[in-house]
Image (cartoon, rainbow, N blue to C red):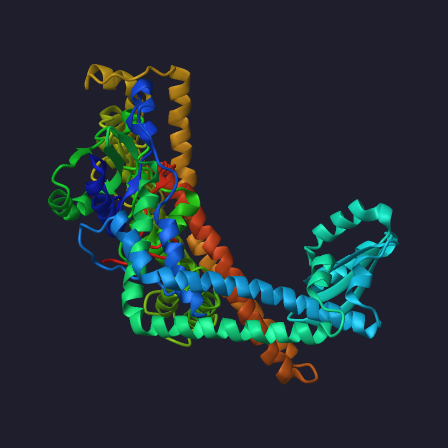
Amino acid sequence: MAVMKMVAVTMVGPHEEMEPVARQMVLSGGFQPLPLDFLINDRNLRSKITTESENPYDELLNKMSAVWKAAGENVPDPEPTPFDSGFSFHKARRLVDETAGQLEEWNKRRETLTEELEQLEATKVYVQALTALKMKPREMSETQFAVVYFGRMSEDSFNRLEETTLDAPLLAIELSRANGNAWVLIFTVLGYRDGARKILDAVYFKEYSLAEISNRMSEDDPLGQVEYGIDSHKSSIKGLEDAASNVLKERRAEFENLYSRLYTMQRVYDLCKGRGEIGGMYVLSGWIPEDTFAKIKEKIERDAPRTSITVEQVKNIATSGVRIPTMLRNNRVVRAFQDVVALYSVPSYGEVDPSPFVALTFILFFGFMFGDAGHGVLLWLGATYLGKKKILNASLAYVMKCASCSSVVFGLLYGSVMGVEGVLPALWLSPMRSPGKLFSVAIVCGIVMISVGMILNMVVRYRERDFGRLLFDGQGLAGLFVYWGAAIGIFVGVSGEQTPFPLSWLWYVIAAVLLLTLFRDTLARSILHQHVEQEGKALQMFEVLHNLMNYFTNTASFVRLAAFALTHVAMSFAVMTISDMLGNLPGGMLLRVLMLILGNIFIVGVESLIVFIQVLRLEYYEFFGKFYRGGGNVFKPVTWRKDRSLLKS
């Protein structure tokens, strides 16, 4: 129903045409690439095809990113930007070199100065520590009696180091702390050099060479020399950032446009990583929804006149052996319930999508079992809060809000508010006053639900051209007649209603139809001339008995609709009774209010969870078991953004 029809598209063309073709596929948001192994079975031909694994636009994109880094700003979010079909890698590289060449050099110089500044700041900490100890830098680096390490690590790592070294010949002295890091001097004995190195590597110790620090320092005024170097480097870094910022300010629109182009082409080449090249011609193939391809086909043919496009449609899914990805397209309400279906399994391609049926029945069944206008409002507020706090994902929060609205509606039909009936006039029935009618409606819901499942199974069999099972199977037309006949017979027998024919005739007809299901395969071969594998009579007899038991047990399962509606009333009555009892104790008014609040929160939280599970059970076992197989692969197209939903061009 909502499973989109897919086609396999294979495009073969020259390099200069495949780039705009792939770009169009990326911007369409509906193309899932296929590996070459799927397309070409001939090993000799496959050995002649080469593929590229590197993306040439990665380097250009990094160069453009350096523009904002040089100015000390964050790289902007790219936006889909239209550009002419003649835009190529060589043109892109020339534009990057022209626009970002100088800024890239400034950024490299800035990174070098930043690294040197880090070394100078480390040196300052070291010199300050030695000054306090009245030692010179060279004395520590040239000691012959111990191994000395100097550097920094995170504060958490330093705390772990202190615990680790309790039983090791290693002494860690903290010099200072800044920005979440601890600067330390570490001493160990000469024979424990390797052991100390392993411990320091485990706590991510960043070491600075004492010999290099000593060689850069003068003996007269080492601290003054370091502070002068720090000030000089900070001034140089600030000057580079100001210069880059001024250039970026003048040409921001131009740079952002080019960055977006490069980002798009990088995504294009991510798509083309699995493409094949043979004799200067490129091969690109994948799945695409039929309607999406129809929209972009004309543009592809116009931009790539020398590219050959082959479209293949797999008609017989059951016998083709091809695992076609499944793409579902539903409205907003039904789309939220796709995740409920996916908890069971994703529909396979060509299969009936049960999401619309689940959306309708889930909402109705939840409200039937949890019908309370007051509790429904509380459930809606809770689902909204949990959704905003990201405790529930968006689709599940939406499902629960739909279910809560159903609870409010059924609460009005029952005349139930916060578990109290009679506050509002019942628009339909009162569960406590009309339990028999409630159970009857639940059974009717079960009969309708199971019948729909069997009808959908017949639709599936029709699509597979399996007319034998469609007509004579216990889950097909014959089974449906047996089920309806049995339902009518039981209803007439229980209610005592008169029928225009003797009731025994109905049971004879049911027995005759059951006999047809027993000879299902024989009838399919002789009447329909359908090739089917013959099953043993014992197995077929067991299948008939299994279907008969399922008719009864599946229908009986829907009694839970009425049972949980009554349970809700009983739980609410229990809360009210306990609150009345507490009202007679000292401080009873406070205890009664507290009991009412906590009791109703408990009902909304626990009972809504139980009802949610019970509805899933009815959907998965009683409904899905009649027609649904699942086992599909989710359609995963290459989109314009790597980590966000597609932005349409």
**Quadrant of the frame with the N terminus:** top left
| Residue 215 spot, x, y in % from top left | 71, 61
- For the question of whether residue 329 can be seen, the reply is no
Q: Nearer the viewer, residue 18 or 31?
A: 18
Left or right relative to 224: residue 312: left
Left or right relative to 89: residue 145: right
Q: Is residue 394 above or below residue 49?
A: below
Q: Is residue 427 above or below residue 96?
A: below
Q: Nearer the viewer, residue 24 or 277?
A: 277
Q: Is residue 531 above or below residue 365?
A: above
Left or right relative to 498: residue 189: right
| Residue 588 spot, x, y in % from top left | 65, 83
Q: Nearer the viewer, residue 197 or 460?
A: 197
- For the question of whether residue 407 can be seen, the reply is yes
Q: How many marks?
A: 0
| Residue 454 spot, x, y in % from top left | 30, 38
| Residue 558 spot, x, y in % from top left | 41, 48
**Quadrant of the frame with the C terminus:** bottom left
Picture residue at 33% right of the left edge, 47% below the top: 495
Q: Nearer the viewer, residue 337 or 408?
A: 337
Picture residue at 33% right of the left edge, 19% below the top: 43
Q: Quadrant of residue 348?
A: top left
